Amino acid sequence: YDLAGVELSKDILAEVAAMSAAQRKEAMQAIVDVEREGALRMELNPGAVELATWLDMQRIPMAIVTRNSAATLTYFLEEMWDAPVNPALSRDGELDLGPTSTPLISKDAPAKPDPAAMLLIAKRWGVPPEEILMVGDSAANDVAFGNGAGSATALLDEGAAGRSSEERAAGKKTHEPTFTVKTLLELVPIIE
């Protein structure tokens, strides 16, 4: 946030979009640099592989929606993730996942927490948004995204950085999850 010149309490992508062209270019480069460094240190949450395997065995589709760049999402999918996802959406639009992927979200689509992507995922999957569970670690972005579409939400609140708890303490109704879990494996009985 500091490197992009944005207050921590603000939506970094919205703030950068409102900057002058020169400021926006510099701020986006700072964001890209931080994401690149973060990708190299990225680790899967405990239970992610087991949950993905279980979802795949149950034939429950998975999607990834991130406010990160397409480059960061591509790195994650190629280097860390082995489960099927469709779609995979970044702030730059949908990744081309091959012949089973039809572009869904354009580069001009709004990022989370705007619910547009969730509504389009529901349409692609042929289910109402109420039958989708949005799982994330940010109340302000992930929970608000799912709630805005009318989906159930699960907040992964590991308590490590305290970010999720702090965001919820802000008291915004859009930030209140349907479920709060400490680990991803706690989602299995919720989904069953």
Image (cartoon, rainbow, N blue to C red):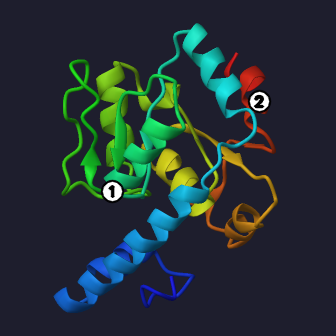
Q: Earlier in the sequence, mark 1 or mark 2?
A: 1
For label 2, the residue is 185
User: Is any atom of residue 150 visible in this view?
Assistant: no
Residue for point 70% across, 61% down:
164
How packed mark 2 is, by other alpha carbons closer than 10 Å (few <14, some 14-19, many 20 or more), is: some
Give the amino acid type for the residue marked by disc 2 in the picture: Leu
Name the spot of residue 174 as percent of width and height, x first: 56, 58
What residue is drawn where x is 42% and y is 46%?
75
Residue type at the position of mark 1: Arg
Q: Tell me whether circle 1 and circle 2 mark residues in contact (CB < 8 Å).
A: no
Up the image or down, 91 lies above or below 121; here it is below
Describe residue 108's horizontal placement relative to residue 64 as left or right: left
Asked if residue 27 is positioned above or below residue 155 in the image, the reply reads below
Task: Describe the element under mark 2 as helix, strand or loop.
Answer: helix
Who's the residue at 73% across and 70% down the image? 166
Q: Position of residue 173 (x, y in %)?
A: 62, 60
Q: How many marks?
A: 2
Q: Which residue is mark 1?
A: 91
* Front in this rendered view, residue 8 or 84: 84
| Residue 32 seen | yes
The answer to whether 28 appears left or right of 172 in the picture is left
